[in-house]
Amino acid sequence: MIDRKQAPLIIDAVNFDLRLKPYQKFILNNGIEVYTIDAGAEEVILIEWVYAAGNCLEEQNLVAATSNFLLRNGTTKRTAFEINEHFEYFGSYLNRSCSHETASITLHSLSKHIGELLPVVKELLIDSVMPEDELVIYIQNMKQRLKVNLKKSDFIAGRLIDVYLFGEQHPYGRFSSFEAFDALQRDQLLEFYKKYYQQGKPILFVAGKLPPDLENLLNKNFGDLPGIKIKAPEAPIQSFIEKKFRINNDPDGAQGAIRIARPFPNRHHPDFLKAQMLNALFGGFFGSRLMKNIREDKGYTYGIHSYLQNHVQQSAWMISTEAGKEVCEATIEEVYKEMKELREELVKEDELKLVRNYMMGSILGDLDGPFQIIARWKNIILNDLDESYFYNSINTIRTITGEEIRELALKYLQPEQFYELVVV
Amino acid sequence: MIQFEKFTLANGLRVIVHQDLSTPMAVLDIMYDVGARDEDPERTGFAHLFEHLMFGGSVNIPEYDEPLQRAGGENNAYTTNDLTNYYIQLPAENLETAFWLESDRMLSLAFSKKSLDVQRKVVCEEFKEHYLTKPYGDVWHRLRELAYKKHPYRWMTIGKELSHIENAQLEDVKNFFFKYYRPANAIMVVAGNVTTEKIKALAEKWFAEIPSGEKYKRNVPQEPEQNAERRIEVKSNVPLDAFYKCWHMPARLDRRYYITDLLTDILSGGGSSRLYQALVKEKQIFSNIECYHFGSTDAGLLAIEGKLVKGIKIEDAENAVEEQLDKMKNELVSEAELQKVKNKTESMIAFEDMSVMNRANSLAYYELLGDASWINFELEKYGSVTTGDILEESRRIFRKENSNTLYYLSQN
């Protein structure tokens, strides 16, 4: 008979030799940097063009996001429909996304088709015309979507907490409104497109099973793009003085969206990696203290999480949950109790070891596959870091002590430093 | 081509091994042949609540999650109307921890009162978060009840109402476990950096002694053919009028399922799809429109839903949709249009197969449907669909008497 009470022996994940597969880099004729990861068994490829064209660069709200969106909706040679049809015919996905510092165009495709797709991507990057009627439809549909979102307490909470942290004028705090959509003009979009796409210089990230002639193919299509490298400027942060907010959005709401957050330095700060460990322990995974207490013991919520926002200029430490209306205040109280315990009690080595192993296993699992590896590299490169960031983070997971964790908690997990918001 | 090996333990547990030495990880996936369709109509939402209780400790192991996290592993689970699936990913060196945990909870749960009390609340919050507080959140509760009169697909996985979850008793939990969570009713897939030899040994060691249990014989009432159209109208505190319509479609193992799947891609799912191009871009009747189906094992539903542009009458919106469907019923789609959605399907399968977890999950699912090797014939089945099939299937599905329509109107 086997003894089922006895756990099988394990190899501690902290002992794993975790490696981030190095990228291959080459430079196109015009100086465009291309980072590549050649890996995987499936014949698929991902290419991302990243421009300094996020909302940090816009002079008017929503111009960056709208330019990015409409980039695919018409060139002098093709209508939006023809462009969509081309990419879809080859079973590929062409997505775009706009963030704060950067905006991207991402192509997912079977490797065998990229020869047919790259010339059309180029067309979008140099010859997009953003037709007026496309803009009108976009504004109308986005306003409708906003109307629906404004009914959701988690949507409202997500916007407001960023305003408290960064101020309404800062790109991290600025949000959409009906007025901002109505104020959009085609000329401004074209001007933004010209300045940041046509005259800007992208960085390329490529991953998957790569064709042998990739460099030639990219040079042929993108090696003659004009443009210079642009850096996103930093805007002044104006966080709110007042800290506690209760908003009533829906009188019939059954739940409150809770956000508790404080400003936190960016990835270059020496505390950042250590704080990731404290965060994991606090609310960063299913076995965290917040989850165990507030979901698994009290049943106040379906889920509660804490995390450090992925911002370049300045981050924030955020606790986020949706809880029953009648237990929102009790939930907040428990969050502060958990902070107090981390400040006052030294974490036991046994719990710390569990978190170490969990984090290592999770990174190991997360590095599985070319798309995941390039995503890590992209984050490192766009934050002006290098591979030592990855290895330092592994080292921190292995070696951080209980005392260091308590010190960090004393420094950062002080309730009076947190904004507190409930939207019902 | 996805390679695998298969064997069955004496107690009836089916085991599939899929080796991939390119990853340092291993995945252990256990699929139980029970879903919301197996529930008592007076105790809906139970299969899903039960899934939560599977994490509340087993007979010999008080805590499920902790030892797994200690081994560098992660896990999750989901319940659908058809099945319940539990999966673990962990460093391959520590695979035995997964065998230990999964076999103990297949042996027996701890049946803790505290766990039931807490998870009832957690699931109620999940219910509120996803279905009560979200605008339009109750749509599928209503549409399922409208479209199904006999089949248990008439309620959602989360359950018909909060009270069914609130009233769940420990006795129900025990009965459910011993009826459905037996080796004879489960499929285990182990994938990643593993060998069949090792898996055979581990499976014997940890699972062989679990009593087989009686194989559950599903006897679910099938939905009779619908003979007359059904319509309902709801007025609610939502900002926009929304249009929903669904039709009965073939079951998962029917060849016609593949035709229907491609049909939904022709209608929606991309910027060049028919409904989007005609009704969002050209006519500007909808601000968004989608066509999809649920991939159900038994005969399912194909749905079209969209939010109306302010000022458009919902009857006009419905007519505009019907006009597009008439086209599908009267004219062959072009070969190029059909090829487009086939290409899309091909690349979707390639992207899905990148992850070991997805491959493990798919193998379990096809084995549950009948045979894991079917995973390798999907593309061929899609490839054989012709433009004539699409025309014929459109005529069979998009009939008025097969339709269920919901006008979800803004009362403001």
Image: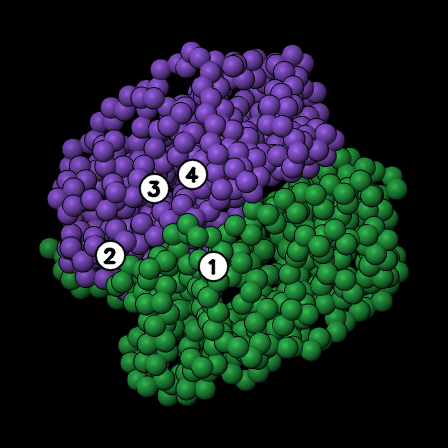
Chain colours: A green, B purple
Distance from disc 4 to disc 3, alpha carbons, whole Å, reads 11 Å
The three-letter code of the residue at mark 4 reads: Asp
The three-letter code of the residue at mark 2 reads: Val
Q: Earlier in the sequence, mark 3 or mark 2?
A: 2
User: Label 4: chain?
Assistant: B
The three-letter code of the residue at mark 1 reads: Asn
Q: Quadrant of residue A268?
A: bottom right
Q: Quadrant of residue B309?
A: top right
Label 3's element?
Answer: loop
Is residue A202 at least partly visible in the picture? yes
Q: Which residue is mark 4?
A: B138
* Residue count near mark 3 (Cα–Cα under 10 Å), binned few <14, some 14–19, many ≥20: many
Left or right of A147 in this view: A296: left
Query: Which quarter of the rendered picture does the C terminus of chain A lie within?
Result: bottom left
* Discs 4 and 3 carry the same chain letter: yes
Q: x, y percentage for residue B215?
A: 20, 31
Distance from disc 3 to disc 2, alpha carbons, whole Å, reads 16 Å
User: Label 2: chain?
Assistant: B
* Residue count near mark 4 (Cα–Cα under 10 Å), binned few <14, some 14–19, many ≥20: few
> Observer-nearest residue: B164 or B53?
B164
Q: Earlier in the sequence, mark 2 or mark 4?
A: 2
In this rendering, the label closer to the viewer, 4 or 1: 1
Q: Which residue is mark 2?
A: B118
- Residue at the location (48% across, 38% down)? B236
Distance from disc 1 to disc 3, alpha carbons, whole Å, reads 27 Å
In this rendering, the label closer to the viewer, 2 or 4: 4
What label sits on residue B158 in the rendered view?
A: 3
In this rendering, the label closer to the viewer, 4 or 3: 4
Q: Which residue is mark 1?
A: A248
